[in-house]
Amino acid sequence: MRILHTADWHLGRILGNLSLLDDQAYMLRQFVDLAVETRPEVIVIAGDLYDRSVPPADAVTLLDDTLHELTSRCPAPVIAISGNHDSQQRLDFGARLLRHRGLHLFGSLGSAGVVQVGDTAFVAVPFAEPAAVRSAFPAYTGQDYHSALAFLLQQLRPAAGRAVAIAHAFVAGGGESDSERPLAVGTAGHVGVEVFAGFAYAALGHLHRPQTLGNARYSGSLLKYSKSEAEQRKSVTLVDLDGATEEFVLTPRRDLRCVQGAFDALRAAPPSQDYLYFTLTDPGLIPNAAQRLREIYPQFLGLEFRKAKEASERITGKAASPGEMFAGFWRHVAGEEATAEQQAVVAPFFEEAQ
């Protein structure tokens, strides 16, 4: 049984003030071509198809076009569940009709179910927030994400035969990225990997870094969606339940990179269309640095000064007054003492804040 596993498309995502829709369409064309080339027996999309519960119209169109092309060109059934960014009820629309075309959408918890493909049962569990599980299943009285998911898997899993779990959850021990929306405060939203014990494989969504935890795997997100993902390789997973697991790296239309250097050197470098975060190593502040960099790098996303960053990390100031903190910060960034005139400029703001 060969399964092509993807997740976290986040269609309609905005990075900074830039739409990623064209970049997402570029990646999805690769994904459809890969599905045709590798000929899996099942295609799984483990949640967060959209970036928000009410997606923009062009994101809906992109999903519609992609699923149409996928089901037209690839005979394998497609199984998709909702994630914490999706509207569960909206994903349910037309689901019963689409099953006849081999597209199995599981949006709301009430639609959670099993798709039998050959000798393998695919247990599809939409995003399971504990309160929503209590509402949909009165027999469940728990309060945490682990018990909610465990309850649903126990309810749905066939008594015998090979089974694959499809879920959208934060498995304890997984590596996070800044672009993931927390499910709960602290570790309350975590589930233990043991919840998937007995399954041949668990196809997961939510964490954007491709990674394996026991018999569970996150395929990772479609694109890099935050600065913390700059060094990640985005991919989809082809898993053979009777053999090996293979990772297929996708090539983005534009990369997302973090670049460090002196302002003049960056201005003199060749222009780039990549999404870029800059860290300037200059000893002092550069007037209008962001605007001047954007003239060369139109997909510029963010800027910080290394000296200022180091100062903010090192100066705790627990016993210092606001004025003393400013003086220390200026000394670290500018390499000189703040003048009386400079301290007088900021003093009224400190007084107002207090």
Image (cartoon, helix red, strand yellow):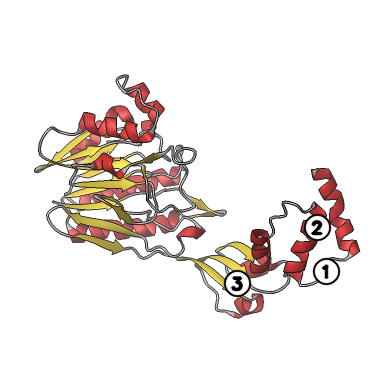
Assign the C terminus to one quadrant of the image: top right
Disc nearer the start of the sequence (3/2): 3
Question: Which of the two residues, 272 or 125, is positioned nearer the viewer here?
Answer: 125
Disc nearer the start of the sequence (3/1): 3
Q: Quadrant of residue 108?
A: top left
Kind of residue at badge 1 = Glu
Element under disc 3 = loop
Element under disc 1 = loop
Question: Which of the two residues, 204 or 113, is positioned nearer the viewer here?
Answer: 204
**98 displayed left or right of 339:** left
Look at mark 3 in the image and give the residue it sits on: 296
**89 displayed left or right of 123:** right
Residue 91 seen in the figure: no
- On the image, the x and y values in percent for residue 12 come to 45, 48
- Asked whether the beta carbons under mark 3 and mark 2 sit within 8 Å of each other, the answer is no
- On the image, the x and y values in percent for residue 49 come to 37, 45
The single residue placed furthest to the top in the displayed view is: 138
Disc nearer the start of the sequence (2/1): 2
- On the image, the x and y values in percent for residue 146 come to 34, 36
Element under disc 2 = helix
Q: Quadrant of residue 99?
A: top left
Look at mark 1 in the image and give the residue it sits on: 337
Question: Residue at left 38%, top 59%?
Answer: 26
Look at mark 2 in the image and give the residue it sits on: 324
Badge number at residue 109: none
Question: Residue at left 48%, top 41%?
Answer: 186
Residue 198 vs 178, above or below: the answer is above
Gap in Å between the C-alphas at discs 3 and 2? 38 Å
- On the image, the x and y values in percent for residue 270 come to 55, 78
Gap in Å between the C-alphas at discs 3 and 1? 34 Å
